[in-house]
Amino acid sequence: MSKIHVSTTVNGDEVEFLCDPRETLLDCLRDKLNLTGAKEGCGTGDCGACSVTLDDRLVCSCLVLGAEAEGKTVSTVEGMAEGESLHPLQQKFIEYAALQCGICTPGILVATKALLDKNPDPTESEVRYWLAGNLCRCTGYDKIIRAIMDTAADLREAS
C-alpha cells in the first residue's frame, strides 16, 4: 500500500510526514514526529491518554487517522509550555501533586486546556463531566480537580 503525504501544523510548526493510510494520528505523532507525550492506553478511545486537539476540537488520537491531519492544526501536550515556562496547568499539576504514573497526565492536561479555552469559569461538575473520558487509575482525581479549579481561578485573575 502506498504512503500518504501529510502536511499539517503541530504545536505551531508546519510539518510533513508520510504515513500508511491505516496509521493512526497517535502513531504518526509518536513514530514519525517523535512527540511521545500522547500515550496509547487503550487504543479504542475509552481512556483519553492520547487526547490532542485537532483544529481546536478535542479528539482521541488513537481514533483519528494520520491522513486526517492534512491541512489541519494539531496541538499536543508538548505544545503547552512556552520555552522553559510551563503552562499554568502544568505548574499546578506539579504543585498539587496531581499526577503519579503519568500515563493519563498528558491527555488530561490537553483536555483541560481545551475546556478552559472554551469555558474559563467552569464549575467543578463541568470539569468532572469534561474529563469523564480521561481515566486515571492512580490519583483518585481529587488533586487533579483542585489543580484545575485553582488554575482556572488564576487565569481569570490574570486576564
Image: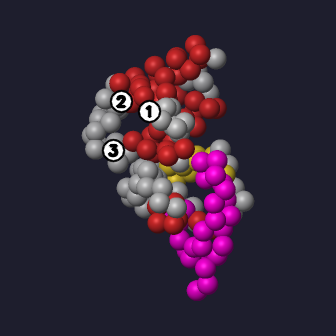
Q: Is residue 151 above or below residue 55?
A: above
Spatial CA span between label 1 and label 2: 7 Å
* Gap between marks 2 and 3 measured at Cα: 12 Å
* Residue that mark 3 sits on: 102
Quadrant assignment for the N terminus = bottom right
- Callout 1 amino acid: Gln
The label nearer to you, 3 versus 1, is 1
- Residue neighbourhood size for the residue with mark 1, other residues' Cα within 10 Å, grouped as few (<14), some (14–19), many (≥20): many
> What's the image's color scheme?
secondary structure
Q: Residue at x 61, y 79 (%)?
A: 3
Q: Are marks 1 and 2 in contact (CB under 8 Å)?
A: yes
SS of the residue under disc 1: helix
120 to the left or right of 48: right
Q: Residues within 10 Å of mark 3 (few under 14, many from 20)?
A: some
* Amino acid type at image mark 3: Gly
Q: Which is more foreground, mark 2 or mark 3?
A: 2
Residue at 58% in and 30% down:
116
| Mark number displayed over residue 94 | 2
Tag 2 secondary structure: helix
**Residue at the disc numbered 1:** 90
Give the farthest residue toward the right: 71
Which region shows up in magenta? Answer: 1-27
- Above or below: residue 51 compared with residue 99: below
Q: Amino acid at mark 2?
A: Ile
Marks 3 and 1 in Cβ contact (< 8 Å)? no
* Residue found at x 41% / y 26%: 92
Tell me the element at label 3: loop
Q: Position of residue 49 (x, y in %)?
A: 42, 50
